[in-house]
Amino acid sequence: MLKPSYLETKARKNKIPLIIVSMIVLFVAIGWLLYSYFGHRLIKAMYEGRSLEILNRIIEGQAVHPVEFYFEKALFLILNVYLIGIGILIGIGIFLTRRRENLDLQLNERTIFLFPLLLVLGFVFLYVFLPNWYLLLVKEDSIVENLQAGSYLLASAITFIALTKLRKSLHKYIFLLLLMFACSTLFIFFEEISWGQRILGIKTPEFFTAYNMQKEITLHNFTPVFEVCHIFYMAVGLYGGLAWIFTRNATWRGADLPRFIIPEWYCSLYFLPIFFIHLWHRYILEWPNRGYLIWPQVAMWRHQEPCELLLALGFLLVAAINYKKALDLIKTS
């Protein structure tokens, strides 16, 4: 009897992930084809009152907005549906894999390391070939900004859960370190959502209107703080991306506290892009000198949003890794 080939063996072991990936591709392809063929036609019919009565009532601002405004809104809705649908499919895949194999699902370190490259390539593809889609993703209060805020909130929640596990342990310095990390990521989350200003419809106070660059309730957009933020972003990006290189041969590297301070090597590509984008903007090619790269509707400074998303995912990844390390530390204590 012939032995199964390497690819056949891999396919059997990864049957569920392959099915989920195929479903995601099919979901995206079908949605794209349906919207490309019917989307604008249906919206235009609704806009002109030629569709079903129940659908015509959805669009009521013909006197205020042109039909292109509703094209953009529909595109933004489609992107959100994609995001939610893909998230649900991935969640189902994780659940089924864990149930079938009866073990913790652990992502390969190389997969984690390479994921930022795939994400960046996806953003580059959208920017070059679908700039309007790209702009919808990176504009204010977009999917990318919401993902950033959600990542910081989840990182904070995971770390607070780890703190509940460590509260009775003897590792006081690690407890304080994780407490600082949890509070910092929670603070960043509130800054990302402007402390709930737009969600709650709070009017910007006069003080913030006068001194805040974006006229909103945030601290990092005050002019003096904003200038320091560039240095902070670069420092965090450089540390998160390269600290593991300079400490890998240090004798104290395996001690408990440094293990929680220094991000693992496979986290590096989540941190380095934010360093390079701010280095480029501030010291190589300042964006006032040229407003855009290829498409005039996408301002140069918008390109920092994908890098900030990677940074937020990096913090989330560090929180998850530290949670696992905290559990291991408790078991060995």
Image (cartoon, helix red, strand yellow):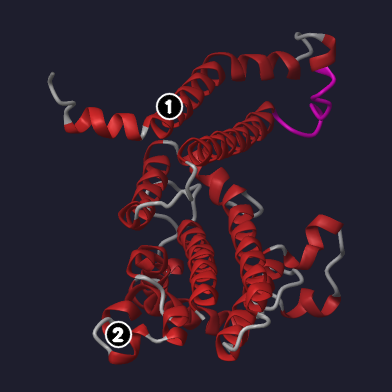
Identify the mark at residue 19; answer none if there is no mark: 1
Identify whether 150 is placed above or below 68: below
Identify whether 260 is placed above or below 126: below
* Amino acid beneath label 2: Thr
Residue 317 point in image, percent of width and height: 49, 63
**Nearer-the-camera pick, 322 or 112:** 322
Magenta region: which residues? 56-66
Which residue bears the numbered disc 2? 247
The residue depicted at 72 percent of the width and 73 percent of the height is 218
Mostly what secondary structure, the magenta segment?
loop
**Nearer-the-camera pick, 127 or 144:** 144
Residue 24 point in image, percent of width and height: 47, 29
Q: Earlier in the sequence, mark 2 or mark 1?
A: 1
The residue depicted at 30 percent of the width and 30 percent of the height is 11
Residue 301 point in image, percent of width and height: 49, 62
* Amino acid beneath label 1: Ile
Residue 258: quarter of image: bottom left
Identify whether 99 is placed above or below 186: above
